[in-house]
C-alpha cells in the first residue's frame, strides 16, 4: 500500500505537466462596427396596430481587418412582430457570415426595440464551416436607425461585441 501512493502521485504529476494534446486556442474578444440594410419580405396584419414580418438583411463588417471576424460579410433572415404607434419591434433570426473563401460562421440572435432606444439584443455563435467549424461564443449588438430610402427598406448602423471561441486545430 505505501508503494501505491507514490506511484499515483507520480502519475498525477506527469499528467499535469504534460502538454494538452488538443488545447483550444481560446476565446477572442471583439468589438466591431457594421452597417445593416434590411428588406421586409413579407408582412401579415395581426390587427390592433400589430403585424408579423419576415425580413432579410445584409451587413458588411467595417474595420475588421484583423481578428476572428476579418473579411466577413453577413446575410440574415429573421421574423418578428412590430407594433405601430410606439414603434416597438421584437425579432429573432439567423445570420450567416462568410469570408472570400466560402467559410461560414453561423449566428442565432434575439433582439428588441422598445420605441425609445436602439434596437439591441444578444446572440450565440453556433459553429460554421471550414475555419469556423466548431466555433462558439456569445455576442451582443445595438443598432441605430439611419434612413428608410423606400417603403420596406431600412438602413442602420451598429456595434457588435462579444467573444468567439475558436476550435482546436
Image: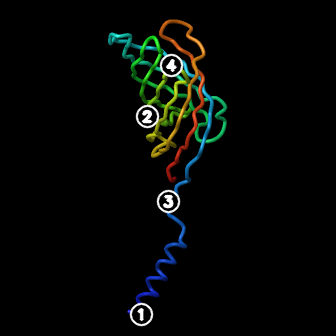
| Above or below 47: residue 102 | below
- Figure quadrant of residue 5: bottom left
Q: Which residue is mark 4?
A: 115
Of helix, strand and loop, which one carries label 4?
A: loop
- Name the residue that disc number 2 marks: 108
- Taking the spot 40% from the left edge, 88% from the top edge, the residue there is 4
Q: Which residue is mark 1?
A: 2
Q: Is mark 2 in CB contact (under 8 Å) with mark 1? A: no
Cα–Cα gap, marks 1 and 3: 35 Å
Q: Earlier in the sequence, mark 3 or mark 2?
A: 3
Residue 63, x across and y down, in percent = 67, 32
Pointers 1 and 3 in contact (C-beta within 8 Å) = no
Task: Provide residue 100's location: percent of width, then percent of height.
Answer: 57, 32
Residue indicated by mark 3: 22
- Specify the farthest residue to the left: 46
Do callouts 3 and 2 mark residues in contact (Cβ within 8 Å)?
A: no
Q: In the image, which disc is placed on residue 109? A: none
* Residue at the extreme bottom: 2
Q: Is residue 100 left or right of residue 53?
A: right
Query: Viewer-nearest of labels 4 and 2?
Result: 4
- Picture quadrant where residue 94 is located: top left
Amino acid at each position: 500500500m505505501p508503494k501505491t501512493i507514490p506511484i499515483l502521485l507520480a502519475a498525477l504529476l506527469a499528467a499535469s505537466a504534460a502538454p494538452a494534446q488538443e488545447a483550444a486556442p481560446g476565446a477572442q474578444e471583439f468589438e466591431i462596427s457594421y452597417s445593416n440594410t434590411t428588406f421586409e419580405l413579407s408582412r401579415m396584419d395581426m390587427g390592433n396596430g400589430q403585424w408579423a414580418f419576415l425580413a432579410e438583411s445584409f451587413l458588411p463588417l467595417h474595420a475588421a481587418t484583423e481578428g476572428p471576424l476579418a473579411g466577413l460579410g453577413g446575410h440574415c433572415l429573421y421574423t418578428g412582430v412590430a407594433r405601430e404607434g410606439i414603434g416597438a419591434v421584437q425579432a429573432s433570426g439567423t445570420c450567416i457570415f462568410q469570408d472570400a473563401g466560402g467559410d461560414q460562421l453561423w449566428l442565432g440572435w434575439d433582439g428588441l426595440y422598445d420605441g425609445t432606444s436602439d434596437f439591441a439584443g444578444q446572440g450565440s455563435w453556433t459553429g460554421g464551416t471550414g475555419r469556423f467549424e466548431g466555433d462558439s461564443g456569445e455576442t451582443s449588438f445595438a443598432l441605430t436607425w439611419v434612413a428608410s430610402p423606400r417603403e420596406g427598406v431600412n438602413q442602420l448602423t451598429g456595434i457588435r461585441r462579444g467573444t468567439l471561441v475558436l476550435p482546436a486545430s
